[in-house]
Image (tube, rainbow, N blue to C red):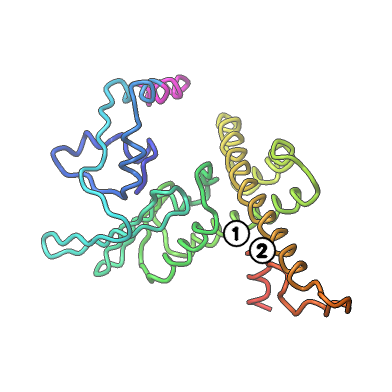
Amino acid sequence: TDHHRGHALGNQYFMPTKVIAHERAHKEMSGYTENFKERVYNSFKREPDIQKQLTNIIIIPPHITFTERATLIYGGREVHLIYVGGHTPATSIAWLPEEKICFVGDILWVDQHPYMAQANTLEWLDALAFIRSLDAELLVPGHGPTCTAEATYKVEEYIRFMRQRVREVYREGKTKNEAKSYLVGEMLEWFPVPPERKSKIESQIKSGINRVYREIQREEEEKAAAAEQTVQVAQPTNGASAPPPANGAEALTPEDQLANSTS
């Protein structure tokens, strides 16, 4: 469902089966070198049981790729591969319409902090809504037990909360590093974390805040530019006072738009 190591480094155990994934997954995996394998191995030095499994990694990129959608028919069963993005630029889901089962990958983390270092959070929110629209009876998440679509709401709340808080501290003038230090404690409270994993999860949360900060910074800069353009267009040329801006003339953030649509 994406190119991250937890999803793609076991391909060798399914050979000679053909590996199918989004074209971006192929692009990312084509850059996995011997140095990458060494870094993966060393990252588990405190978990020797896992490290032992990584001694003979063979990187196998996808043999077949798609861009938006692909349908597989095998043994009378249909599997729809659908690109959704959000978690990574390569994230896809596998939907079995007859069985009403959806393999949603890392779009869904059940009662865990999602990894967001490559996220496009607005795409992620759209992906969660799309998954709910499928009316699946069973979801197979990237992390956590199988569940129903009800589990998607907690991830959505988590993402929206992080976006909201990052926007608030950005508007207060805090830097990216300040935002990470300021917000990591708040985000950590969302899900229980074993003491031995706290340091790793804090780093994971900080990488997500870092990503969201860049998104919010871009959105705020675009909003300011749009507002400035509106002011320039509204400037009178004959010395008369400019009329007040119409409702909605100021560029709205995605959160503002959501509030307007539900009010």
Q: Amino acid at mark 2?
A: Thr
Give above or below for 184 relative to 170.
above
For label 1, the SS is: helix
In the rendered image, residue 69 lying in the magenta stretch gets the answer no
Q: Which-is-in-front pick, marks 1 and 2?
A: 2
Q: Residue at x 77, y 43 (%)?
A: 174
32 horizontally vs 195: left or right:
left
Which range is magenta?
Answer: 39-51
Where residue 218 appears, as percent x and y from the top left, is 64, 51
Answer few, some or many: residues within 10 Å of disc 2's Cα (few below 14, many 20 plus, some between 14 and 19).
Answer: some
Q: Residue at x 66, y 63 (%)?
A: 253
Q: Amino acid at mark 1?
A: Glu
**What residue sits right under mark 1 in the picture?**
157
Where residue 122 appears, as percent x and y from the top left, is 54, 59
**What residue sits right under mark 2 in the picture?**
253
180 horizontally vs 150: left or right:
right
166 horizontally vs 132: left or right:
right
Where residue 177 appears, as percent x and y from the top left, is 70, 36
Instruction: Identify the image quadrant of the C terminus.
Output: bottom right
